[in-house]
Image (spheres, rainbow, N blue to C red):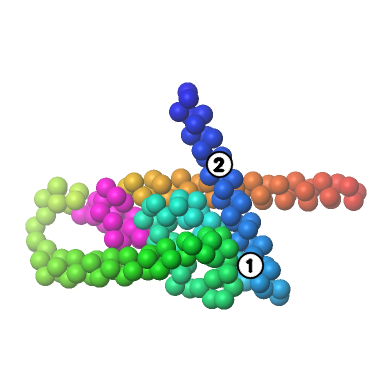
């Protein structure tokens, strides 16, 4: 019972931290760009949400470092300001480290693929070989879905996937609550006009 209460309180703290960082990022982005198109707004929401959810994990997971490396590849003027505002200037060096990690991981993955190609495949597969192939295919799909997953082994991939899913659930819950609050506000405004 205590574990469940601690888990829900840590989830609430995580949601609160994400919301605070996300709103901070959105405010910073809108302050840097006065005239925003719908595409600019979409990008601002996504960028702020990605940085906020990755920073709530304190870069302790591979997926959070991969998200930051992805963000750092596409940093323009306003995006850089948002990143620095959410993370603080000290933590922006983590982005540079993440880039190096991702580059080395890609080289390693490329070498592994080259080795696999040279080995070839057998013509006759037993039932266990078919099952292994199915697991490999599903693992490849999972590696594409989890940020930074391509460079992880299976055990690490499962742990990172679970953490990533929990973080995405936090992000969805916060966004859903904001959407519900906005709907309720609009409903009450419409009722008062009638």
Asked whether 151 or 140 is in front, the reply is 151
Q: Residue under label 1, please give it.
A: 29
| Overall secondary structure of the magenta section | helix
Q: Residue under label 2, please give it.
A: 13
* Residue that sits furthest to the right in the current view: 194
Q: In the image, is 168 to the left or to the right of 151?
A: right
Asked whether 7 or 28 is in front, the reply is 28
Q: Residue at x 66, y 49 (%)?
A: 178
Chain part drawn in magenta? 133-157
Answer with the quarter of the image where residue 26 lies. bottom right
Q: Residues within 10 Å of mark 2 (few under 14, many from 20)?
A: few
Counting residues from the N terminus, which is met first, the one under dot 1 or under dot 2?
2
Asked whether 40 or 63 is in front, the reply is 63
Is residue 113 in sight in this rendering?
no
Residue 121 within the magenta-colored segment of the rendering: no
Q: Position of residue 53 (x, y in %)?
A: 51, 54
Answer with the quarter of the image where residue 110 lies. bottom left
Q: Residue at x 45, y 28 (%)?
A: 3
**Which secondary structure, mark 2?**
helix
């Amino acid at each position: 019972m205590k574990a469940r209460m601690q888990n829900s309180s840590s989830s609430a703290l995580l949601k609160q931290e994400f919301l605070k960082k996300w709103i901070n990022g959105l405010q910073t982005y809108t302050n840097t760009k006065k005239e925003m198109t719908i595409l600019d707004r979409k990008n601002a929401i996504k960028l702020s949400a990605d940085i906020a959810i990755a920073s709530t994990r304190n870069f302790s997971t591979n997926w959070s470092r991969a998200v930051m490396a992805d963000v750092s590849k596409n940093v323009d003027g306003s995006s850089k300001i948002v990143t620095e505002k959410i993370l603080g200037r000290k933590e922006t060096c983590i982005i540079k480290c993440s880039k190096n990690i991702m580059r080395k991981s890609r080289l390693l993955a490329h070498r592994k693929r080259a080795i696999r190609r040279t080995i070839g495949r057998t013509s006759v597969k037993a039932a266990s070989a078919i099952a292994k192939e199915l697991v490999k295919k599903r693992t490849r799909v999972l590696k594409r879905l989890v940020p930074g997953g391509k460079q992880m082994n299976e055990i690490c991939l499962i742990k990172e996937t679970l953490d990533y899913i929990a973080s995405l659930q936090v992000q969805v819950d916060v966004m859903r609550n904001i959407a519900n609050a906005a709907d309720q506000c609009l409903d009450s405004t419409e009722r008062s006009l009638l």
